[in-house]
Image (cartoon, rainbow, N blue to C red):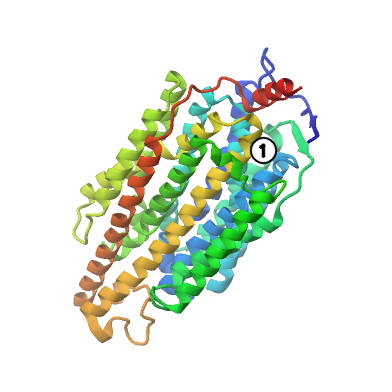
């Protein structure tokens, strides 16, 4: 396979030829802004969704799909972005992904109905997929694994803060009379434009072009299979029974498409997901853990804002403030763990500790109810945030450290793909569980009036408009259903911890991805 390297203009380097720390920090500034706004898009609507659903006449299923559609588009396109990074300029691709994000945000901000809103979220997701995959690929190219812990910790914090701070920002916008929920989408536009400009001025990387072909058939089959499973998981229990011909048909088609995708990928010259990388035990175990962490984290936390507003009766702004303990826990643990990994050169202890703490946080949140105090809830959320911060980004670091430099891009995109897929599946499946549980409990406790006068059975209630006795029942129902989601997340998190325990710790490499690739190419010749 022939490759040509086009050196960047005026690349700043130290005496060893490695990109200087000042240049790295300058490049990371644009990457971090881009990463933050793309991740923010996944969660900024969380506290705004009850208001959006009410204004656009949506249902609980639509509530779930406004989140899931963005996650799904991000998941499906991550491997494609990673593959294109081998063909074209990484800087150009990142700027293109941010441009798509701007287009999606503008469409969402002016949407007239839920159908257009879901479509706009798909466009946002495609852009976010590029940013999620390419940011880590660029970092691995510039920074050695031994030093990557420091920067990965910061990026993990940015990812986590973007994931969890979104509800706070969304709540503030919804409660500001002269702004409203549409600004949850529009607010990211100027920051995205700033990120594009920063990247144009600061990011400079060699362009390595490879003579490869993109496996579009494999990409289509993977996307179609995952979409089919997600459609089933979001509709089962509401539109049709879990045990029904619809379930058998959708699950059967989804599994068949994914099986054919595996067959195609095993024979493709340049597969979207090279099955060979799973021969590496670290990559396989990190992938399993990433999927499970994605299911537990996204699947559980996305519905917390609904719990705050419906079960506890808080305003969107207060509901956003309620997420601060998780933000601070994640921010501190991710940053501190990254610094200590760089200092000591050891990382497995942080993965194991993160898995244990995250498991404890999920179990504690499984005990919440309609009367849980703010202090207790804050402690539980902080515990979960600390665990996620120590675990999530360091899984990528462990895998990147254990593969050849030529596989850095595909390894990073595969891990990002499976983590995002876990999140999409988690939100979709647990959202369906929540909707089904709420409908069942409402029918049991309120009988024929459960859906209200002419309202759909799975309609999201407006707490303020309900009579006091009914409001109490509805709040208790949502509290019980939300706690059930975290209890479902407990065994998933336990499996993630089990996978982490079997990852073998290896010394962190002291060469950057570009340096390792040059060394490997020299050895091959």
Drawn side of residue 200 relative to residue 382, left or right:
right
The answer to which quarter of the image holds residue 18 is: top right
Crowd band around label 1 with a 10 angstrom C-alpha radius: few (<14), some (14–19), many (20+): many
Q: How many marks?
A: 1
Considering depth in this image, is 344 or 256 the residue closer to the camera? 256
What residue do we see at 50% from left, 65% from top? 229
Relative to 462, say whether 508 is above or below. above
Kind of element beneath mark 1: helix
The x, y position of residue 131, in whole percent, is 60, 45
Drawn side of residue 436 relative to residue 90, left or right:
left
Considering depth in this image, is 257 or 25 the residue closer to the camera? 257
What residue do we see at 22% from left, 67% from top? 476
The x, y position of residue 230, in whole percent, is 49, 64
Q: Work out which residue is located at the far top of the displayed protein and give it.
A: 15
Drawn side of residue 115 relative to residue 432, left or right:
right
Relative to 79, say whether 285 is above or below. above
Considering depth in this image, is 524 or 12 the residue closer to the camera? 524
The answer to which quarter of the image holds residue 485 is: bottom left
The answer to which quarter of the image holds residue 200 is: top right
The x, y position of residue 316, in whole percent, is 37, 60
Task: Look at mark 1 in the image and give the residue it sits on.
Answer: 199
């Amino acid at each position: 396979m022939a490759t040509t390297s086009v050196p960047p203009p005026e690349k700043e380097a130290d005496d060893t030829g490695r990109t200087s720390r000042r240049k790295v920090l300058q490049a990371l500034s644009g990457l971090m802004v881009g990463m933050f706004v793309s991740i923010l898009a996944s969660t900024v609507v969380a506290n705004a969704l009850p208001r959006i659903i009410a204004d656009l006449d949506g249902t609980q299923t639509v509530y779930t799909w406004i989140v899931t559609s963005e996650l799904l588009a991000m998941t499906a396109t991550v491997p494609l972005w990673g593959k294109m990074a081998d063909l074209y300029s990484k800087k150009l691709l990142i700027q293109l992904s941010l441009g798509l994000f701007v287009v999606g945000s503008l469409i969402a901000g002016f949407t007239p109905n839920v159908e257009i809103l879901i479509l706009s979220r798909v466009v946002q997701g495609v852009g976010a997929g590029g940013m999620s995959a390419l940011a880590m690929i660029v970092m691995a190219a510039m920074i050695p694994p031994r030093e990557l812990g420091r920067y990965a910790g910061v990026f993990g914090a940015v990812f986590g803060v973007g994931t969890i701070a979104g509800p706070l920002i969304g709540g503030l916008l919804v409660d500001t009379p002269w702004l409203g929920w549409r600004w949850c989408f529009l607010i990211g536009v100027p920051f995205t434009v700033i990120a594009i400009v920063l990247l144009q001025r600061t990011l400079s990387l060699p362009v390595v072009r490879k003579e490869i072909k993109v496996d579009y058939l494999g990409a289509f089959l993977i996307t179609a299979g995952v979409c089919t499973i997600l459609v089933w998981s979001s509709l089962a229990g509401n539109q049709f029974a879990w045990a029904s011909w619809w379930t058998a048909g959708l699950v059967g088609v989804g599994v068949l498409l994914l099986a054919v995708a595996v067959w195609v990928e095993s024979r493709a010259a340049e597969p979207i997901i090279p099955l060979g990388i799973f021969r590496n035990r670290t990559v396989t175990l990190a992938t399993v853990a990433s999927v499970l962490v994605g299911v537990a984290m996204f699947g559980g936390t996305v519905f917390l804002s609904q719990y705050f507003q419906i079960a506890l009766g808080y305003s969107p702004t207060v509901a956003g403030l309620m997420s601060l303990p998780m933000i601070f826990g994640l921010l501190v643990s991710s940053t501190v763990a990254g610094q200590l990994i760089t200092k000591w050169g050891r990382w497995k202890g942080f993965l194991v500790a993160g898995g244990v703490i995250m498991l404890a946080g999920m179990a504690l949140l499984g005990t919440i109810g309609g009367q849980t105090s703010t202090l207790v809830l804050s402690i539980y959320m902080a515990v979960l945030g600390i665990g996620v911060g120590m675990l999530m980004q360091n899984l990528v670091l462990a895998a990147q450290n254990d593969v050849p430099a030529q596989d850095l891009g595909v390894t990073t995109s595969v891990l990002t793909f499976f983590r995002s897929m876990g999140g999409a599946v988690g939100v979709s499946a647990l959202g369906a569980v929540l909707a089904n549980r709420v409908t069942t409990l409402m029918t049991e406790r309120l009988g024929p009036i459960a859906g209200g006068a002419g309202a759909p059975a799975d309609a999201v209630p407006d707490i303020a408009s309900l009579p006091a006795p009914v409001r109490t029942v509805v709040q208790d129902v949502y509290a019980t259903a939300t706690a059930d989601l975290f209890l479902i997340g407990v065994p998933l998190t336990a499996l993630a911890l089990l996978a982490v325990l079997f990852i073998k710790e290896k010394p962190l490499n002291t060469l950057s991805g570009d340096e390792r690739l040059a060394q490997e190419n020299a050895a091959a010749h």
